[in-house]
Image: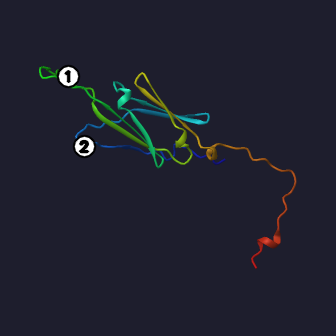
Amino acid sequence: MLVQDPFRNFDTLFGRVPGRSTSPMPMDAYRRGSDVWVHVDLPGVSLDSIDVSVERSVLTVSAERDWQLEDDDRVYLSERTRGTFRRQVHLGEGLDPSGIEAAFTDGVLTLRIPVAEQAKPRKIEINSKPMAIDVESSVPA
């Protein structure tokens, strides 16, 4: 049985923004029923700095996390990545980008991407009567 895998064409690309650090955003993606669910970890990121867009079947998630030092601050440790983050994923033909929904809760961006109707499995009815074959129209003249 041939089943179209919507993850087959997932390409992960990391974009670079000049003057900003770039880091991967941890992501999980799975299919449940008629939807593909994507969870992206964005701890410490405000909702206002998140942008989600789709262009030519490429889903782009970008976000920014930053903090400003004051003149008299003395930094003892700086391990938290800050700057602009961007992640692009190719959606493949089996998904419907027009129906994507997004929510942001507790530092996790959740995307629901519906599987396209043409990619959903369908049952083929089998007829018990023989099919007529038109011999004359199938022979070249």
Which image quadrant for residue 54?
top left
Disc 2 to disc 1, C-alpha distance? 24 Å
Question: The C terminus appears in which quarter of the rendering?
Answer: bottom right
Compared across the picture, whether 23 is left or right of 40 comes to left
Image x and y of residue 110, in percent: 47, 30
Callouts 2 and 1 close, C-beta under 8 Å: no
Instruction: Please tell me the numbered disc located at residue 18.
Output: 2
- The type of colouring in the image is rainbow
Residue farthest to the bottom, as pictured: 141
Query: In the rendered image of this protein, does residue 113 appear above or below residue 128?
Result: above
Residue type pointed to by label 2: Pro
Location of mark 1 (residue): 77
Which image quadrant for residue 95?
top right
Query: In the rendered image of this protein, does residue 134 appear above or below residue 58?
Result: below
Question: Under tag 2, what secondary structure?
Answer: loop
The crowd level at tag 1 (other Cα within 10 Å; few <14, some 14-19, many 20+) is: few
Image x and y of residue 105, in percent: 44, 23
Q: Residue at x 82, y 70 (%)?
A: 135
Q: Which residue is drawn at 82% across and 73% down?
A: 136
The crowd level at tag 2 (other Cα within 10 Å; few <14, some 14-19, many 20+) is: few
Residue in front for this viewpoint, 110 or 1: 110
Image x and y of residue 13, in percent: 38, 44
Q: Which residue is drawn at 42% across and 21% down?
A: 106
Compared across the picture, whether 106 is left or right of 3 comes to left
Q: Residue at x 86, y 57 (%)?
A: 130
Residue farthest to the left, as pictured: 72
Residue type pointed to by label 1: Leu
